[in-house]
Amino acid sequence: MPSARLSVLPSRGVLGQSALLGLLVLSASGCSWTRFNDITENSPIVLLDKPGSMKEGFGVSVATATFDTNVEVLVGGGIGVSGAAMYDIGDQESPSTTAVDTGYCSGGGPCYLSSSLAGFPTAVGPDADHSLCFAVGAGTVDTSGLVVRCEDQTEYDLTIPSAAEAALDFALENAQPDDFPLASDRTANPSLLASSPSAHVAWFYPSRSMSFSQLAPPPGLPVADDSFGKTLSVLSIGDARIYAVGVPTQNEVLLWKSDGSAASSYIGCLGGTAGFGRALASGKVNRDGDDDLVVSDNVDVHVIDGSLLFALPETTSTECGFASLPEGALIDSFGCGTSSSLSDCADSEFGAALAVGDLDGDGDGEVIVGAPSMTVRGQGRVGALLVYDAEGPKDTSLADVKFISSAEQGDQLGRAITTPSIMGRDIILAGAPGNGKAALFYCSALLAPGAAGSRCP
């Protein structure tokens, strides 16, 4: 059974052979890799055009939603002071790089964009169902609450707990932007998780519901911390859900489970390493069909089996650790890896953002880790994405690395990550807000030859 402190496994993997071969081919052909994504007509990396209306922080947050053959991504700007832009990237390899809607948390009623966004294939509105919707922040459409905007430009509010509403009203009345982080799962009918760190509350909306249910911590568990709910994740366990709420300055992740209804029960608190909970993600890392929980601390990334978490009983314990985890629940822990192009792991901010995506379409997901201050080819704070095939301690490897080949110093790629689905597999969308960029990465070293598509050399 895991001890109260996670054992950290060293990084064992190296950059995949196919990726190295690709670099060698480019070098041998005389093509400049530095500008490869700019000069290649069918580039493996596509930069989205920043709208002129978004002056600050483009790439701070990203989200995705898919309905039928429509795949949309949302790229957010500065938290509380900017809006977000939606792009139609299609389900093949020909994305539109021009935003089709820049009205998210901008141009309408008062709205403060959240640090994390949530996408829905379909969502229940006050009038009817709508497709391709995003929860984007908090403000006022008709009443104070969370703001949802859909592809058809319908906007509406979701009611929020009274403590969160008071915090929002104060922010609006005093023009002091406040953050309301958001997260959803990747099912056809997602559940939405939200928080107000300033009010120290978290709540969720069950699948296809506009009514919130507040998450109640056990008596005696201190939650009066301004990092409460700064990071969030929703795990889909069949029709049930696990709601994970990070309190990173306390090195904690609080867990609740629900059978899919408005009822929830507190099942414990994970913690024990510095910065634990600074980023959260969920997805199908192993092959049991349920989402798993991915958590970063100040140094490492940890993958925890979601189905075994869901087996935890309701508790009133206020202890935070790992002793209560079922045997085998910790799938793996791993640290920063390097390649010939990447250096300075110690100052890379490894784990600043996380995502899970099935990049090779084999049915289980890879863990994508953002390292926005990573040095790339000698340039500081360019940022990179490190891809781990994390099926267990004996199998985890650094399978691939991604960076913008025409990168500039200070890009900070990897501050935000999501994984849109196309052609039966996932690709990567990552924000590089240091210089106002967002990039789609279409290729993976994990793909079999001939299966990578026309964009992949």
Image (spheres, rainbow, N blue to C red):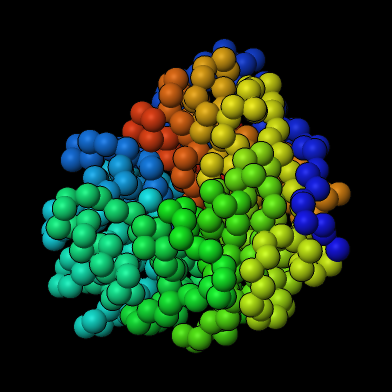
Could you say where residue 335 lies in the image, as x and y percent from the top left? 71, 39
The answer to whether residue 68 is left or right of residue 220 is: left
Count all numbered tags in the image, as a single digit: 0
Q: Residue at x 64, y 68 (%)?
A: 318
Could you say where residue 222 lies in the image, as x and y percent from the top left? 53, 64
Which of 370/315 is in front?
Answer: 315
Q: Is residue 341 visible?
A: yes
Placement of 142 over or under 109, stated as above or below = below
Placement of 218 over or under 261, stated as above or below = above
Could you say where residue 109 lies in the image, as x and y percent from the top left? 13, 60
Which of 143/56 is in front?
Answer: 143
Q: Residue at x 60, y 57 (%)?
A: 252
Q: Residue at x 30, y 59 (%)?
A: 137
Q: Residue at x 37, y 41 (%)?
A: 59
Name the residue furthest front.
220
Could you say where residue 140 lies in the image, as x and y percent from the top left? 18, 65
Which of 64/90 is in front?
Answer: 64
Q: Quadrant of the C terminus?
A: top right
The answer to whether residue 280 is left or right of residue 119 is: right
Q: Is residue 236 visible?
A: no
Q: Tell me which corner region of the image, top left, top right, bottom left or bottom right, holds residue 81.
A: top left
Q: Quadrant of the N terminus?
A: bottom right
The answer to whether residue 342 is left or right of residue 158 is: right
Placement of 63 over or under 275, stated as above or below = below
